[in-house]
Amino acid sequence: MENIGRDLLEMRRVALAEPHVAAIREAGTEMRYPAGTIVVRPGDPVDHFFYVEEGEIEVLNSFTGERLIDATLGPTQFMGEVSFLAGGSWSMGFRAARDTRVIAVPRTEMLTLMAHIPEMSDLIITVLAARRRKQLEMGLSSLVLIGEESHRDIRQIAEFASRNRLPHMSYPLGSAEARAVALSCAADPDRPAVIFGKDTVVTDPTPATIARLIGMNQELVDDEAVDVLIVGGGPAGVAAAVYAGAEGLRALVV
């Protein structure tokens, strides 16, 4: 079984230290997924951290239902995306390839653990950041743009995704890949489209719509006071916010 580790496909599995695992077990709840069960779907809120105790979890191709890549998650590894840090949505689906047992920790409790155990936090953030980097390099995402070259609105979404380092795939209108994705979603293969997972064809394709879809939008109160303003929502920026929270500070990442 290949492993999703620091660099998703290339680097060795990096295990959490036993005291860290003990803290995760104490904070979380055991959950079991029979083989073939969907663990999360694209667009689901990233509201839990999953530590794998037994079994195997695979990344799912949302459009074909097949395994997306050869790498899988096994015991001592954890399932997560960098959007976990800021409270976004899953960009890909995950499925139990075998009978699987995990420890699921609610996001707020896990962030508290990470804030109080810097060594664990550093490792988790490093792994999540590497996974995002590999997603961007390989175009691993359930967000698909069709016809970017011929439709201004979709081109704006592509620019928005690139600026914000959001994994996505872009196919020319009429290409075999575009037709396959469109037909899997019962969409018109001859029209430009924005598709997120098999069940969502975006009818109002704007950057704001995509931000809401993937959980990037934040409702802010105009006169709300914060202690720390962090510019840059990458892993380092979000990590700074996690540590600020551990010190009792209110942080805003933009």
Image (cartoon, rainbow, N blue to C red):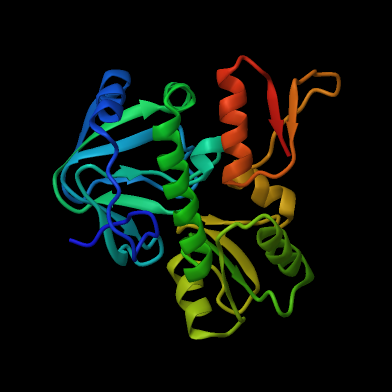
119 and 195: which one is in front?
A: 119
Q: Residue lying furthest front in this view?
A: 119
The quadrant of the image that shows the C terminus is top right
Q: Residue lying furthest bottom in this view?
A: 175
Residue 217 appears left or right of 170: right
Q: Residue lying furthest top in this view?
A: 248
Quadrant assignment, res 119: top left
* Residue at x-position 74% and y-position 41%: 231
Indicate the position of residue 9 as horizontal and vertical percent values.
34, 64
Indicate the position of residue 18 as horizontal and vertical percent values.
23, 31
Quadrant assignment, res 47: top left
Residue 43 appears left or right of 10: right
The quadrant of the image that shows the N terminus is bottom left
152 and 224: which one is in front?
A: 224
* Residue at x-position 68% and y-position 74%: 148
Q: Residue lying furthest right in this view?
A: 223
Indicate the position of residue 34 as horizontal and vertical percent values.
16, 43
Up/down of 184 relative to 72, above or below: below
Res. 253 in view: yes
Res. 48 in view: no
* Residue at x-position 54% and y-position 85%: 175
Count of numbered badges drawn on the protein: 0
Indicate the position of residue 56 as horizontal and vertical percent values.
20, 50
* Residue at x-position 66% and y-position 59%: 161
